[in-house]
Amino acid sequence: MSHASSGLPVGRGLIYLIVAGTTWGTAGAVASLAYRTSDLGPVSLSFWRCTAGLAVLLAVRPVRPRARTAVSEPLGRKALRVGASGVCLAVFQTAYFAAVRSTGLAVATVVTLGACPVLIALGARLALGERLGRSGVVAVTGALAGLAVLTLGGAEASVRPMGVLLGLLSAAGCCVMTLITRAARAESAGTSVGVFAVTSLCLLPLAQAEGLVPHTAQPALLLVLLVYLATVPTALAYALYFAAAAVVRSTTVSVIMLLEPVSAAVLAVVLFGERLTPTTVVGTLLMLGAVAGLAVTEARVPA
């Protein structure tokens, strides 16, 4: 099946989301290494990630095939959509990093990624008329349970109200960005470029206040990390995300995004030698099962 306005088959959109969610999980490991090798702060890292990703997208834009769409989006409407998505992306990333600093990684991850499917499901039902269905409810419930087990199982987590509020703000930014893309039902090569440009402008003053230029004893390693962060989990992953979010139901998008903590958990075991605990296995299996179930359901929904 292909969506009428974008021309992208739904099955390919699901593959795009799986690749995007998986590569997003590598960003955490790269950020951890960047923090260890430099004094780069989270907002500055996010700024350089978006700015360098924008440069990569601009570099490959002349050779990127143009998508054929059956529906032409008015220029003013497209500018409003891209601008709003860029602001939402800035809120999503910055609020999440602030939540991590306030209440810790585990709680921030549970609140942000756990609230995303719920908010998006409600928003898609109210704003777009999308029905979740019985199988969708089961999948979302399983995904949330898997996320909770994966991030909180066996860990002592301190919950701070401000961190929870920041996590909810981050989830709200992600929710609005996803709904805007889905409501437009159109994607073009300029979408990711415009969104990253707006996000970079939003983050620039915050990054300057935090410290824009990092100090490091290993500049070559830091440069390699930033290049990878800009190309794979940013330029590539978000280009795939914006293309797929235009054709795949919003709730399905939000659940497949939960592949990020799954891939991050796998990398923690493989690269950093963390122990593979039973809670990690159970949480990963629950979330992968939810993703697989929603993918099958999505493939059966008429375009």
Image (cartoon, grey):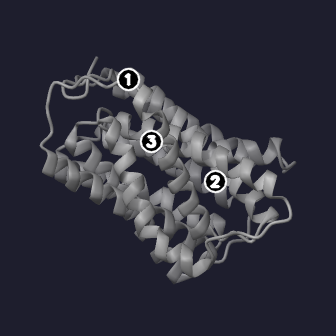
Q: Amino acid at mark 2?
A: Val
Looking at the rendering, which quadrant does residue 7 occupy?
A: top left
Q: Could you tell which of marks 1 and 2 lies nearer the N-terminus?
A: 1
**Residue 220 relative to residue 96: left or right:** right
Write down the residue under mark 3.
Answer: 58
Residue 301, disc: none
Residue 65, disc: 1
Q: Give the number of the mark in front: 3 or 2.
A: 3
Q: CA distance from mark 1 to mark 2?
A: 42 Å
**Residue 232 relative to residue 250: left or right:** right
Q: Kindly identify the residue that appears in the image at 66 percent across and 77 percent down.
A: 158
Q: CA distance from mark 1 to mark 3?
A: 13 Å
Give percent across and percent down for residue 17: 46, 35
Q: Could you tell which of marks 1 and 3 lies nearer the N-terminus?
A: 3
Most foreground residue, 303 or 150: 303
Image height of 81 relative to 206, above or below:
above
Q: CA distance from mark 3 to mark 2?
A: 40 Å
Most foreground residue, 125 or 169: 169
Write down the residue under mark 2.
Answer: 149
Asked whether residue 89 is in view, the answer is yes
Give percent across and percent down for residue 236: 51, 37
Q: Amino acid at mark 3?
A: Leu
How packed mark 3 is, by other alpha carbons closer than 10 Å (few <14, some 14-19, many 20 or more), is: some
Look at the numbered disc 2 and give the secondary structure of its residue: helix
Q: Could you tell which of marks 3 and 2 lies nearer the N-terminus?
A: 3
Most foreground residue, 120 or 194: 194
